[in-house]
Amino acid sequence: MNAVLSRNTTKLRRHPGARSGRALFAVAALLILAACEQNSFVPPPPPEVSVATPARKAITRYLEATGSAAPVKSVDLVARVQGVLQSIDYQDGAFVKQGATLFTIEPETYKLKLDQAQAAEAGAAATQKQADADYKRQADLAGKQIASQATFEQSIATRDTAQANYQQAQVNTKIAAVNFGYTNVTAPFDGVVSAHLVSVGELVGVTSPTQLATIVQLDPIYANFNVSEQDVLRIRAAAAKRGLTANDLRDTPIDVGLQTDTGYPHSGKLDYAAPTVNQTTGTLAVRGVLSNANRILLPGYFLRVRVPLDENPAALLIPDSAIGTDQGGRYVLVVNADNIVEQRKVQIGQLDDGLRVIESGLAVEDRVVTAGLLRAIPGQKVDPKPQPAPSPRGVAKQDR
């Protein structure tokens, strides 16, 4: 059997068709190898990104904080005497001048008490005058040894008692006059009065002073805000550089803006700083005072506050959109001399005309990636396309 297979195999090998098949197979293999050589992998070109050097500009460094508006004066108007509320003499929410009558509380009773006290004072004055005359007469008689010593001493006691009664009557008259004055509740200063809390005909001041309304002074107005301990150290260091004392800081200008304001249109100056740092919050309470003649600022408003610290004649600024954030803080992507992307940690400052100030971590010659940030991967090569330095005004939103 094996001999037969061997002879058949020999015949097949010698068959011409077998040789042509092997030739075709060899040609096909060569073609496949050639095709593989022609389709070898070609790496893609580096991605294009836009780069620009930081802009340079002289700026004023500011301390920025948030706070709230508060009235310089705010007083609860109360009934200091008991009686029926006779009239309300203002419109709710009206601006009133100092001394204007706002409420009237049953003045007739207190006017009668004042008249009574004045009459008692007049009687005491007459008695005192008579006692004084009698004393002088008895003193003259005693000097001539006509009147007894006991009579003279009695005249002295009568005179002193009449004098004391007269002084008491004067005090009673003043008290009655004060109480009568309390029947007219007046404005202690210029301000806006809130809605009345009691109605005409209501009995007030029965067991304790009854609150009638509240008057608030709106011009000037306070801006209260807190400063962190780190910022306090910065302010004191900046003040020491400029040779300023703690009293000089009271005249430091401040700028204030509302939530709807663009920028900081309201100006004032520092008025007060707490003597100690709150250990619970680690902040220092600071207050500014602003003119508010048009009453644009109202107590309780949320405020944006900035305080000038110092001048930087050559600050570096880049678009805010070029700054990234990770667990390590803020960073920017820069392209080095070999067109390799690097991640650079930076310390940022304030916004100035739409650009972000870079306090540290960036040099003026650095090429910062401003567009195509998603294509810029640290450690990889890119094709940088230089762009003009960012303009401080009208900065366009960059392509992320």
Image (cartoon, rainbow, N blue to C red):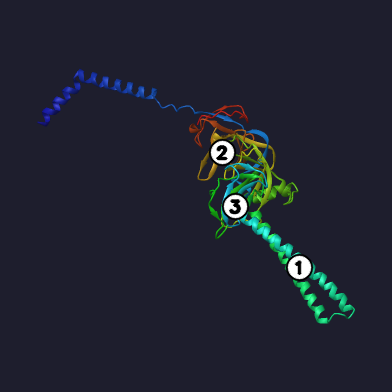
Tell me the number on the disc at residue 209. none
Residue type (three-letter) at the residue carrying disc 3: Ile
Residue type (three-letter) at the residue carrying disc 2: Gln
In the rendered image, residue 235, in percent from the top left (x then y), is placed at: 67, 48
In the rendered image, residue 142, in percent from the top left (x then y), is placed at: 86, 78
Callout 1–callout 3 Cβ contact below 8 Å: no
Q: What separation in Å lies between label 3 and label 2 (alpha carbons)? A: 43 Å
Whether residue 28 sits left or right of residue 107 in the image: it is: left
Q: Is residue 248 above or below residue 313?
A: below
Q: 346 or 257: nearer the eye?
A: 257
Task: Write down the residue under mark 2.
Answer: 259
Q: Quadrant of residue 126?
A: bottom right
Q: Earlier in the sequence, mark 2 or mark 1?
A: 1
Image point 64% across, 57% down: which residue?
Answer: 112
Q: 218 or 150: nearer the eye?
A: 150
Image point 90% across, 79% down: which residue?
Answer: 144
Q: What separation in Å lies between label 1 and label 3 (alpha carbons)? A: 35 Å
Residue type (three-letter) at the residue carrying disc 1: Thr
Task: Write down the residue under mark 3.
Answer: 105
Q: What separation in Å lies between label 2 and label 1 (alpha carbons)? A: 72 Å
Q: Badge 2: how crowded within 10 Å, few (<14), some, or many (20+)?
A: few
Whether residue 25 sits left or right of residue 210 in the image: it is: left
Image point 70% across, 61% down: which residue?
Answer: 119
Q: 39 or 340: nearer the eye?
A: 340
Residue located farthest toward the front when viewing the structure as drawn: 146
Q: Is residue 173 above or below residue 237?
A: below
Task: Write down the residue under mark 1.
Answer: 127
* Front tag of 3 and 2: 3
